[in-house]
Image: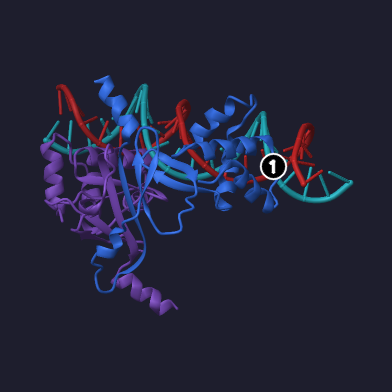
Chain colours: A blue, B purple, C red, D cyan
Amino acid sequence: MLKTDEIIRMMSSQGLRITDQRKTLATLFSDTPGYLSPKDVYDYMGRFYSGLSFDTVYRNLRVMEELGVLEQVMFEEGVKFKLHCREHHHHHHMICLQCGLTYPITFCPMDQTNVPEQFKVVKHKFEVFGYCKDCNQEEANVE
Amino acid sequence: MLKTDEIIRMMSSQGLRITDQRKTLATLFSDTPGYLSPKDVYDYMGRFYSGLSFDTVYRNLRVMEELGVLEQVMFEEGVKFKLHCREHHHHHHMICLQCGLTYPITFCPMDQTNVPEQFKVVKHKFEVFGYCKDCNQEEANVE
DNA sequence: CTAATTGCAAAAGGTTTGCAGACTC
DNA sequence: GAGTCTGCAAACCTTTTGCAATTAG
């Protein structure tokens, strides 16, 4: 995982200015193991910046994504962001529906997929959703 | 694939009224091998109904989805619809980025995925994107 | 004839853009 | 000091909702 100051350094080296908000964003994402929606980010940031506006959050998410610090994924509920994986090998994710935590899946199903003769594969998506150890337990306790 | 009159019958048997628009919708989807966005549908329908409104398109897409005639999938570009697969077995899709055509993939990667001890899997997604035979050829011709 | 469907208008989300003042480097 | 970033306001796009008129069964 990227640490806060690595993120800061990445942004700074690209000519971006390091504002308080961006520091807080860097900390937020380096402390969060999973995906965050723009609203999640806005709510979190709002606790520290009273006059915070949604557009700034969006702008910073975009900037950080274009820079390769964050990666963006489309869920049923909308767009979410997380730190860009630093894994060197191609991999997929197992994602907790409760807390957003992700585990890497090293196995890639493409290796075993029969592609029709003239179909040119460009990309693929393999995602597993469920409840992680902790969230599973919580759920069990509630019942 | 479902044929137009099967779709009509399904809708009718659920107490839905069969309007001209719904007949056209049924035809559109039974003739389309792939995914359509609400806008695609609206544009197509608009050619036949001058006063067409977007909300009616949405309402009908929703109704047909709730009825199980259509299935809805989230792509990067937004929501899209296609005829609900009638395949009996669980399967995945290979999707053409150009024309939206889908091929079924019978192989399911979940069988070979190592799930961490206490992770409870709820659902998964495996999709392959690329260009189908026809669109591949077109692309080749353009170059 | 009755209830479902449609178009219109308007609202509700989510996301983007232009601008002037504030701030980083 | 120059140029970037921020908040504000407003625009934009997609999707939903309430209502009265229309239409299918």
Q: Where is residue A42 in the image (x, y as percent from the top left)?
A: 54, 31
* Residue at x 55% of width, y 35% of height: A28
For the residue pair A78 and A113, the one nearer the viewer reads as: A113
* Residue at x 63% of width, y 50% of height: A10
Q: How would you rate the neighbour count of disc 1 (Cα within 10 Å): few for under 14, some for 14-19, many for 20 or more?
A: few
Please identify the quadrant where the N terminus of chain B is shown. bottom left
SS of the residue under disc 1: loop
* Quarter location, residue A141: top left
Compared to A118, does B58 lie above or below?
above
Compared to B99, does B17 lie above or below?
above
Left or right: where B6 falls relative to A68: left
Which residue corresponds to mark 1? A18
| Figure label count | 1
For the residue pair A8 and A57, the one nearer the viewer reads as: A8
Q: Where is residue D12 in the image (x, y as percent from the top left)?
A: 54, 44
* Residue at x 21% of width, y 50% of height: B26
**Amino acid, disc 1:** Ile
What chain is tagged by disc 1? A
Q: Position of residue C1 (x, y in %)?
A: 15, 22
Left or right: where B59 falls relative to B139: left
In the current view of this chain or complex, which residue is farthest to the top? A142
For the residue pair C12 and A123, the one nearer the viewer reads as: A123
* Residue at x 69% of width, y 38% of height: A19
For the residue pair A99 and B38, the one nearer the viewer reads as: A99
Compared to A90, does A28 lie above or below?
above
